[in-house]
Image (cartoon, rainbow, N blue to C red):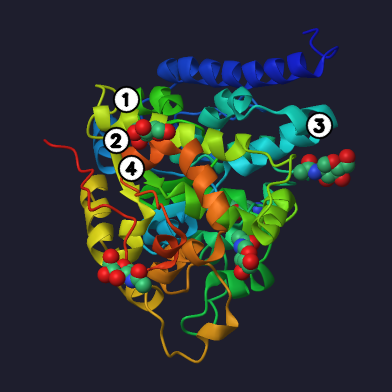
Amino acid sequence: MECSWKTVLLLVCASLGVQYTAIRSLRGSIAEPCGGADRCQFRRPKEYRWRPLCDGRPPSEGSFSSLSSSRKHILLFATTRSGSSFTGQLFNQHPSIFYVFEPLYHVQQVFTNSSSRLRRGLDPRALLGAYRDLLLNMYTCDLHFLENYIRPEPQDHLTGSFFRRASSSALCSPPVCLENGGAPGEPDEAWCPRRCRTLNLTLASQACLARGHVAIKTVRIPEVQDLRTLSEDPRLHLRIVHLVRDPRGILASRMGAFADQFRAWKIWNATGRQPRYVDLAQITRTCQDLADSAQTGLRQPPWLRGKYLLVRYEDLALHPEEKAEEIYRFVGLEMDEKVRAWILQNTKRSASPTEGNYKYSTTRDSRATAESWRLRLAYDIVGVVQTLCNRTLSLLGYKPVHSLADLRNLSYSLVEPRSFLPLL
Ligand SMILES: *[C@@H]1O[C@H](CO)[C@@H](O)[C@H](O)[C@H]1NC(C)=O
Ligand SMILES: *[C@@H]1O[C@H](CO)[C@@H](O)[C@H](O)[C@H]1NC(C)=O
Ligand SMILES: *[C@@H]1O[C@H](CO)[C@@H](O)[C@H](O)[C@H]1NC(C)=O
Ligand SMILES: *[C@@H]1O[C@H](CO)[C@@H](O)[C@H](O)[C@H]1NC(C)=O
Ligand SMILES: *[C@@H]1O[C@H](CO)[C@@H](O)[C@H](O)[C@H]1NC(C)=O
C-alpha cells in the first residue's frame, strides 16, 4: 500500500489494516474447526494461525450459547478524572471478574508516538476502529492481540510495559503473579510493580478465561454511539456503565492531575484573571460528549436497550453500597462480599494507621473527594464552565450556582436527586 507519503493517510491505512485483519479473522472463524466457541474465535493478527488456547478443543454445539449467555462483558465508559479508578475497583475486587484498566492506552501510544504532527493534532475518533478491535479481543481474553501495541514489543509473550498492571487484581495474583500480596489492606499498586515478575501474556489470557467475566475501563472512547458495533455484536454480552461527573469537578481534578497542560487555568484560578490563551475547547468537548452519550443512552435506542446504565459519580460517592448493588443488578452478577468489604474500607475516613501511607485516589473519603472542587475552584471559572456546559449540567441534574456563598456552602447540594434507571 502506498500510504506512507502523508502521516494522516498512514494513520488511516494502519487503522484500516487492523480492521481488515480483524474482519478476515472473524470471517475465517466461521469455517474453522473451533469457530463457534466464544473463547477461541480470534486469530492472532500478526501470525495467521490459531492461538494455543484453541488447539485441540473440539467444537461443541452448546458451548457458544452457554458461554455467551453466562459470560458478562462490562465496559466502564468514562472520561478522565470522573471517578473511574474508584468505580473500577467495584469490578476489580470481584473474584470472578477479570478487570483491565484502560488497555486502549497502548493503541494511543503507538499512534501518537509515531510522529510529532500526529501527537499534536490527533483526533481520538481516528483510532476508533483500532480501539474496537482491541476491546473485542480483550473481551474474548485474547491478550496476545495487545502485543501489536505494547512498546517495547513483548518477547516470548513477556512484557514489563503493561499499562497500569497493578490496577488489575488478576494480574497481581496467582497464577499470573506468584507473590501472595502485600500487608493486609495494602493496595496492589504499592507492592505488585516491585514484586510481580514480567507479565506473561499467555498466563494472563488464561487467567482471564478462568475468571469468567471481563470488565474493562476506558476513558478514550468519545461517545456511546462509538460503541454501537460492539453493542450489536451477538458474541458479546455487553453492559455499558456510563460514569458521569459534574464537569466542574472534572475540570478541578484535571487541573490538579495534569498541571502542565492546565497551567493557564491554574493562573486564572490563582489570579482571578482569565489569560487569553486558556483552552476552553477541551472541557467544552468533554461536556458535549457527556451530554450526547447520556441523551443517546437514556433514549434507549434498540441497539442499546438494557445495555446502558448511567451512573453519577456523586451518587456513588454518597451512597456507595446502594449504587454498587444497582450496578451489579444491571450487569447481572451477584455483588461479592469482597466488593462490599472494599467499599466499607474505602469510602469512609478510617482510623487505620496504614492508610496515610498510600496516596491512592480510591482510598479516601469518597464523598469529600467528589465535592472538594467546590472549595478549590475560583468562582469565575465555575461561571464560565456553567455557561459552556449548560446543557450537560441540566441533563445530568447538576445545579448551577449563582453566588460565591452557594458555591462554598457544602450543606447546599448541587446534585439534584434523580434516578436514571430505565423504566422497564
Ligand atoms: C516513542 O519513541 C521514542 C523514540 O522515538 C522511543 O524511545 C519510545 O520507546 C517510544 N515509546 C513508545 C511507547 O512507543
Ligand atoms: C508463559 O506461560 C505459559 C503458560 O503457562 C508457559 O507455557 C510459557 O512457557 C510461559 N512463557 C515464558 C517465557 O515463561
Ligand atoms: C485554586 O486556587 C486556590 C487558592 O486561590 C487553591 O487553594 C486551589 O487549590 C486552586 N485550585 C486548583 C484546582 O488548582
Ligand atoms: C442555557 O443557558 C440559557 C441562558 O444562557 C438558559 O436560558 C437556558 O435555560 C440554559 N439551558 C439549559 C438546558 O439549561
Ligand atoms: C448553606 O446552605 C444551607 C442549605 O441550603 C442553608 O440552610 C444555609 O443557610 C446556608 N449557609 C450559608 C452560610 O449560606
> Is residue 12 rendered to the left or right of residue 63?
right
Secondary structure beneath label 1? loop
Between circles 2 and 3, the one closer to the viewer is 3
Q: Say what amino acid the circle numbered 3 marks.
A: Ser
Mark nearer the N terminus (3 vs 1): 3
Mark nearer the N terminus (2 vs 1): 2
In the depicted structure, whether residue 201 falls above or below residue 144: below
In the depicted structure, whether residue 208 falls above or below residue 239: below
Q: Residues within 10 Å of mark 4 (few under 14, many from 20)?
A: many
Mark nearer the N terminus (3 vs 4): 3
Mark nearer the N terminus (2 vs 3): 2
**Residue 80, position in %: x, y?**
55, 48
Residue in the picture at 49% in, 55% down: 249
Q: Are marks 2 and 1 in contact (CB under 8 Å)?
A: yes
Mark nearer the N terminus (4 vs 1): 1
Residue in the picture at 51% in, 29% down: 132
* Residue 396, label in figure: 4
**Residue 119, position in %: x, y?**
77, 33
Q: Which residue has dot 3 on it?
A: 114
Secondary structure beneath label 4? helix
Label 3 near ligand 1 (CB < 8 Å) = yes
Label 1 near ligand 2 (CB < 8 Å) = no
Q: Quadrant of the C terminus?
A: top left
Report the Cα–Cα distance between label 2 and label 3.
Answer: 38 Å
Q: Which residue has dot 1 on it?
A: 234
Q: Say what amino acid the circle numbered 4 marks.
A: Leu
Report the Cα–Cα distance between label 4 and label 1.
Answer: 31 Å
**Residue 223, position in %: x, y?**
46, 30
Between circles 4 and 1, the one closer to the viewer is 4
Q: Is residue 206 shown to the viewer in this render?
A: no
Q: Say what amino acid the circle numbered 2 marks.
A: Ser
